[in-house]
Amino acid sequence: MSRAGIALAAVVLAGGRGTRIGGRDKAELRIGGERLVDRAAAAVRAVGADPVVVVGPERAAVPGCAIVREDPPFAGPLAALEAALVALEGVADDAWLLLLSCDLVRPDAV
């Protein structure tokens, strides 16, 4: 439940092949020593999102967040969103959903 009293959940997309960045793992990239996936998860938590689901490989796991994988892996963002929505079953029907990519430089600004 967010601070405003509105149910708020979040999905952080952390999969993909990273082809635009030379095949590097986006979730593991760091800014100021902090992984991009951790920065995105912290940003959604800061506005009260709970639960938070990270979609990607196990190495993208963030403590306190559910981790799921799209099926098949690398099937794209729609498959990732579907996997996250399955994981969020049981969350209030009137909940708002934040959807962020893990590779945002300023996820707090989003």
Image (tube, grey):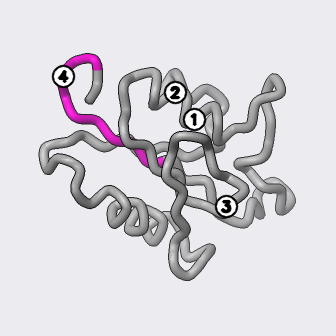
Residue type at numbered disc 2: Ala
Q: Tags 2 and 1 in contact by the CB under 8 Å rule? A: yes
Q: Residue furthest bottom?
A: 72
Mark 4 falls on what kind of element?
Answer: loop
Image position of 83 with respect to 46: above or below: below
Query: Range of the magenta residues?
Result: 3-11
Mark 1 falls on what kind of element?
Answer: helix
- Of the image marks 4 and 2, the number of the one nearer the N terminus: 4
Residue type at numbered disc 1: Ala
Neighbour class for label 4 at 10 Å: few (<14), some, many (≥20)? few
Q: CA distance from mark 2 to mark 1?
A: 5 Å
Q: Which residue is mark 4?
A: 5
Q: Which residue is mark 3?
A: 58
Q: Which residue is mark 1?
A: 40
Measured from the top left, where is residue 89 in percent x and y? 26, 60
In the shown orientation, is residue 75 left or right of residue 58?
left
